[in-house]
Amino acid sequence: MSQALEFSSVSKIFRTRGKTVQALRDVSFTVSEGEVFGFVGPNGAGKSTTIKVMLDVIDDYEGEVRLYGVSARDAASRKGVAYVPESPALYEQFTPLEILRMALDMYGIRRDDRDAWCMRWLERFSVAEYAKRAIRQLSKGNVQRVALAHALVVQPRLLVLDEPLSGLDPVGRKDVVEILADYKAQGGAIFLTSHVLHDVERIADRFGFIHRGQLLTTRAPHELVAERADRYLVRYQGGATLAAGAQTVREGEFELELAQAELPAFIERLQQDGGRIVTVKPAMTLEAVFFQVLEGALGPGAMSGDTSQAAASAG
Ligand SMILES: Nc1ncnc2c1ncn2[C@@H]1O[C@H](COP(=O)(O)OP(=O)(O)OP(=O)(O)O)[C@@H](O)[C@H]1O
């Protein structure tokens, strides 16, 4: 599979008023076509700097960044790349329909069904009813939806999203997760940042944990959890009498935490008793693993207090 995005040993130091901040330290990762890569880290970890480097907003860095094999320093690398910032600033006086038309013009995309195509994307993001109202009359969440429609209307090959779900209500989050999954299924690549592990877990195939400019790990969420899990949550039906310590989930269905070594014997006894397994999943949450990874890399207490790079370089 060819690489949509490739960071090789990227380092970036900001120097302002005699103060030095290392925003990125030797960061390397790749994102393949058809892959969703989630970039997670606390405030000041280096997420925005990573996006700025990939979009060539920052160009004085060390290392190499390539988009579809072309250096990020070359404007041609951004062909077919769409970006949605965390708080998108769309022209307030224009309407969503005009904004989507402008996106097509900007990307040099001509379509006979231009307005129908734009309306289709506004419909997908549930903002078609506002198609002809000025942006300034829309709520923050609806502006966010228009911005996402504006990015997808051009059918980008790489989509760069800064906190894509942050301003959305639960229905909006679910809609966007589904739309992004469709886009990915069609071969699109996504690089997205988030503070919220649960969101990343829902969308991303793999994710990177960044902290103080350092990429601590890149893994699939389930891999990371499974690697560290030696205890499992077993949900089962029937056979209630055989499991001390089981919690009732609903009538006839129970949940029990077991060590990995205890699993085979439990399953055998359950089957003998006429019960059946519903699910088996690691008892460890992604969030717990996240803190383990950080503490493992940086030592206990690394997550307490100010986690910004400025604090790190001052300390
Ligand atoms: N223009 C700049 N000049 C000086 N320091 C900067 C500049 N931009 C970012 N930094 C510093 O670089 C580090 C990384 O910042 P960055 O904005 O990339 O973090 P982030 O992960 O996006 O944070 P957040 O989640 O809060 O948006 C921080 O310590 C920040 O203060």
Image: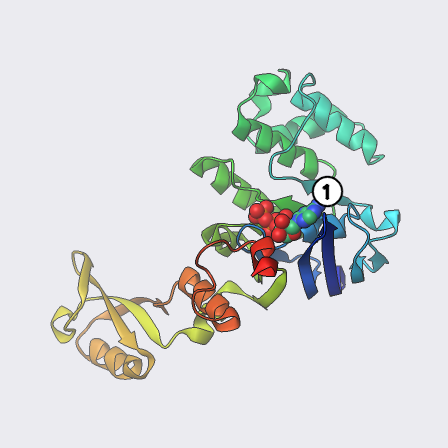
137 versus 225 height, above or below: above
Q: How many marks can you see?
A: 1
The reply, left or right, for residue 314 in relation to residue 174 is: right
Beta carbon of the mark 1 residue lies under 8 A of ligand 1: no
Look at the image and tell me whether residue 225 can be seen.
yes
Horizontal and vertical percent position of residue 107: 82, 36
Q: Position of residue 172 (x, y in %)?
A: 49, 36
Q: Residue at x 79, y 62 (%)?
A: 62
Compare residues 120 and 131 and report the one nearer the observer: 131
Horizontal side of residue 304 vs 32, given as left or right: left
Q: Residues within 10 Å of mark 1 (few under 14, many from 20)?
A: many
Residue with the mark numbered 1:
82
Judged left or right of residue 303, residue 183 is: right
Residue 111 appears in the figure: no
Comparing 35 with 208, the one in front is 208
Residue 166 position (above or below residue 255): above
- Who's the residue at 16% across and 73% down the image? 243
In which quarter of the view is residue 122 placed? top right
Colour convention: rainbow
Q: Quadrant of the C terminus?
A: bottom right
Q: Position of residue 178 (x, y in %)?
A: 54, 45
Q: Point out the residue furthest to the front here.
A: 18
Q: For the N terminus, which image quadrant?
A: bottom right
Quadrant position of residue 314: bottom right
User: Left or right: where does residue 103 sit relative to residue 202?
Assistant: right
Please name the residue shown 68% across and 64% down the image.
Answer: 25
Q: Quadrant of residue 110?
A: top right
**What is the secondary structure assignment of the residue under circle 1?**
strand
Residue type at mark 1 is Ala
Provide residue 17's location: percent of width, then percent of height. Answer: 72, 47
In the image, 128 versus 96, the foreground residue is 96
